[in-house]
Image (cartoon, rainbow, N blue to C red):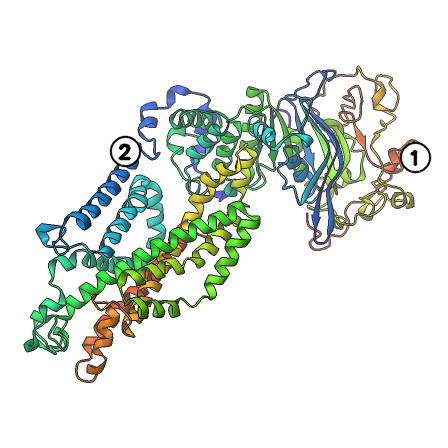
Amino acid sequence: MQSTHGDSMSRRHTTTDQAEPLLRITDLRTQFDTDDGVVRAVDGVSFEVNAGETVCLVGESGSGKTVTAESITRLVECPPGEITGRIEFRGENLTTASAARLREIRGAEIAHVFQNPQDALNPVISVGKQVAETVRIHEDVSERAARKRAIDLLDRAEVPDPATTADAYPHELSGGMKQRVLVAAALAGDPDLLVADEPTTALDVTIQAQILDLLADLQREMGMAVLFITHDLGVVARVADRVVVLYAGKVMESAPVDSLFADPGHPYTRALLACLPGRGRESGSIPGDLPSPTDPPTGCRFAPRCPFAVEACTTDSHPSLYPVAQEPDTDRDGAGTTAGDSPDVSTPLSAAPLDGAASRDLETTGDGVNTAHVAACIFHGPDRDAAHLDREVSWTVAEPDGGGR
Amino acid sequence: MAGDEPAPDVGTARTAGTGFERIDWTAVDDADSTVPPAAVAAEALVFFSLVAAFVYDYVILANEAPTVGVVGWDVTGVEWLLVVVLAIGVFHAALPLARNRRLTAYYWRQFQKNRAAVVSLGFLGFVFLVGLVGPLIWTAPNEAIDYAAAYQPPVFAGGSWAYALGTDAQGRPLWHLIVYGMRVSLEVGLISMVFAISIGTVVGTAAAYFGGYVDEVLMRYVDLQQTFPVFILLLLLIYLYGASLLLIIALYGLFSWEGTARLVRSEALQRGEEAYVRAAEAAGAGRWWTIRRHLIPNVSSTVITAATLSIPVFILGEASLSFLGFGDPDVFSWGRTISAGRSDLPNAPWISTIPGLFLFLTVLAFNFVGDALRDAIDPR
Ligand code: SF4
């Protein structure tokens, strides 16, 4: 999976000086009251999704990526959950929207595809009927008309022989086919934003590729934006326009995909990249564990696992997002080191090879923070020496058994 | 599950495109598998005519006149209930199964994996049919009293084919007693089950759906009922009003639904957490919608299993009552026949053991079938 690239999802570059992004999340905090204390699953996350683009939320499990995605339409159960911050969808703040309004938005404007197709389908209802029922949530149509729509949707999700498959029960279909059915159901309301939470994780590698292609095709056809949640950087390289890296409920780095792969600004991102097959380390995981969700470390949350950590990392509060300084030898169009002050840079990203150092252009918006390349590490701060991060670090730390993800 | 991707997904799916013309809309229309309004109308009609026939029987016909003249069958109160229960069974079990053939075939394949259950199902089918039509074919035991033929051994113990299973102390053929006992067991098992399961399901769903205060009150009552000595209440009522099958059935039905209520409640709560319920919520479904489309169909598999497993409990309960002499003196329950044969155990052991064997096999078969059903429709 790792370095498939190029042809997959169209890199869509909506002009970034559009008035409003489709979705703007500002300082989202989702916490849960548990017996062990307050779990701050999402702790001040901000990012944007523009119409038609694909944004990837990346992180290990427990990083808060799923909770972030489910907070958007308040799918997390409240209580025990509590969501604060602003979630603006087309300018409408969803954190304060009524339950009824959210139900209108769910499915019709923001649809979800979940990780495990096996569980997301009801075993005792035929799949066609389940898609048809989803059609009927938002449209007052007859059962027969809904069934026709369902078959049409299954066809769009490239389910072979949709009229027959519609009568099948979930257990009669393969995992990939079930995920197609769920994609078809998600399309029922013709959403503008599709939130895909690890939609391919439970599938075989070849089937994964098919589902990713399908999502890319549908995205192009229907012009929806996709918020893609994954822990797999191979998938990210394949689908993303922009990437938001989460760790322990905080945004560690946010960047256009090429920029992120070419020049990761955050030690955590580097660690993730080092875990990709063929990138140095043997296999899969960053040494150490996620910090305790009820009692995160002071200072940088990644500090306990970070090979670059210095004392200052553990004393201050968590570093805020700083623009990632460019490497000195890179051609840039003159602008300063901060991303925010070059608002007219909109050179399209080339589909550069992942490890090439080709494109360093920053995609920026007026306020710069969310679409530019930013990272939350003190070495990108105003008076620190980012060169520190260039020091050679061997990620090939002896693998403890099961530091797992 | 991810590994067994069928070949079409790889090849043909890519070329599928958005071709409307490939879809045969007539086939689509024909395959519409929703509940046809005709079935609802038919059910209403059947229940209406049942009520009408009941009223006719009780208000117009003379008390002793047979209801169904041709076969001389005077339908009693309990039998009316049995007919209602059977009609419910036809409309809510047999018809849906026949309509959703694919699902039925799948369940049957799963069910078949359990050989003992298939044999048990066959035996229960036999008991059901004989219990239903047998009393119309063979005369009531009391009309077959023939002291000259008392203590005939069964065929396998050297008896004659005229009395295949032997006779009892009054010369009643044991087979007649067995057949009438089947009818009694059928009535007790099925009617009590329908009572208990209906109440239990309603209470359990209500508790899960409303939650909070309602849940608390209902479940505390369930706790109370579970510790309540129904058997003592039964004895008291029988002492006060005399034993009748209807009373026994009603008491079993009304005081033994707490297990089902608990089960349905916990199942409904648990199903509420399932990924498909969350997926429905993510698609904008409201709570009632989710209950109707997801909870009820899924809880029904639990209910069916619970129903199957509750039947033998009721049958056994009635048999015990009859064995102890608290049964309805007008019906030939297996328990009563067993009890009557006790004194003859040394010289005519078949009088007790044959009905005992039927009772044992029936209870065992229900348990086998219940277990296999659970595995087949609820593979967790
Ligand atoms: S601030 Fe940067 S260097 Fe310090 S611990 Fe965090 S990630 Fe590592």
The answer to whether B292 is drawn above or below residue A400 in the figure is above
Confirm whether residue B302 shows in the render. no
Q: Nearer the viewer, mark 1 or mark 2?
A: 2
Q: Quadrant of residue A15?
A: top right
Q: Residue A212 at x, y = what percent?
A: 57, 31
* A74 displayed left or right of B31: right
The answer to whether B247 is drawn above or below residue A43 in the figure is below
Q: Chain of mark 2?
A: B
Residue on which disc 1 sits = A384
* B310 displayed left or right of A24: left
Q: Residue A158 at x, y = what percent?
A: 47, 28
- The quarter of the image that holds ligand 1 is top right
Residue on which disc 2 sits = B38
Q: CA distance from mark 1 to mark 2?
A: 79 Å
Q: Chain of mark 1?
A: A
As shown in the figure, which amino acid type bears the numbered disc 2?
A: Ala
Q: Quadrant of residue B40?
A: top left
